[in-house]
Image (cartoon, grey):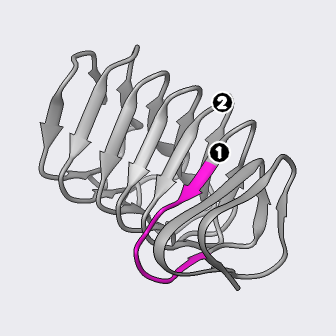
Amino acid sequence: ITVTINATGAECSSITFASNSANSALNISGAFTLDVTGDISYSDPSLDGRVQTIGIGTGIVSCTNLNFANTASFNRDNNLTITTGSLTVSGGIIMSGAANENAFTCTGNSIINLGGNFTGTGTFTAGTSTLTLNGTGSQSIKTGTYRNIIINKASGVTTFAGATIATGRLTLTSGTLN
């Protein structure tokens, strides 16, 4: 099952992948936009060897929370890939599954704007992306390697959950880093 967004201004209240026996994909092609006013949630595919994928090419996606599932098997995967597009999450990114179950991969100069926490044990591959932490409350990001991190908060404290590496730049525009 593949759904492709190829229109500017597409919106919906939420997206939840069904727990089914087929591979499932949501692709935002071209420079199109998808505004999800609620959460985007993966589920546990019902058969081994199945993958649920979101692909953001040069498009723009926004949502409240991005929830990766803790799948029942190491070969039931939840994947998100961004090339040069952007993802804005006003809440949190929660990668509940193991590193071999959840993958968030940036392959180009993608932009991630995050208003909440980035948690979990899934794999994050930064590529040449920029992660901007812009929430108004306290924010925590998972241990890992990032390319560029920008902290631009009107209020609240940013905390790294453990050893965090910025291979490009760490920029503190506004806010507190603990």
For residue 137, say whether it is visible.
Answer: yes
Q: Which label number is shown at residue 130?
A: 1
Position of residue 14 measured from the top left corner of the image (x, y, whole percent): 18, 53
Which residue is drawn at the image coordinates 36% and 60% (left, top)?
43
Q: Total number of numbered labels?
A: 2
Residue type, numbered disc 1: Thr
If you read the primary sequence from the N terminus, does the residue marked by circle 2 or circle 1 appear first? 2
Residue 162 place in picture, x, y as percent = 78, 81
* In the image, residue 11 lies in the stretch drawn in magenta: no
Tell me the quarter of the picture where residue 60 sits.
top left
Q: Position of residue 8 (x, y in %)?
A: 22, 20
Is residue 54 toward the left or the right of residue 118 in the image?
Answer: left
Q: Is 148 in front, or is 175?
A: 175
Q: Residue at x 50, y 68 (%)?
A: 153
Bin the neighbour count of mark 2 within 10 Å (Cα to Cα): few under 14, some 14-19, many 20 and up: some
Judging depth in this view, the residue of 13 and 160 nearest the camera is 160
User: From the viewer's perspective, is residue 41 above or below residue 82?
Assistant: below
Which residue is the site of mark 2? Answer: 109
Could you say which is closer to the camera, residue 18 or residue 168?
Answer: 168
Assess whether mark 1 and mark 2 are in contact (beta carbons under 8 angstroms). Answer: yes
- What are the residue bounds of the magenta stretch? 131-140
Q: Is residue 138 above or below residue 167?
A: below
Of helix, strand and loop, which one carries label 2? loop
| In magenta stretch: residue 135 | yes
Image quarter of residue 110: top right
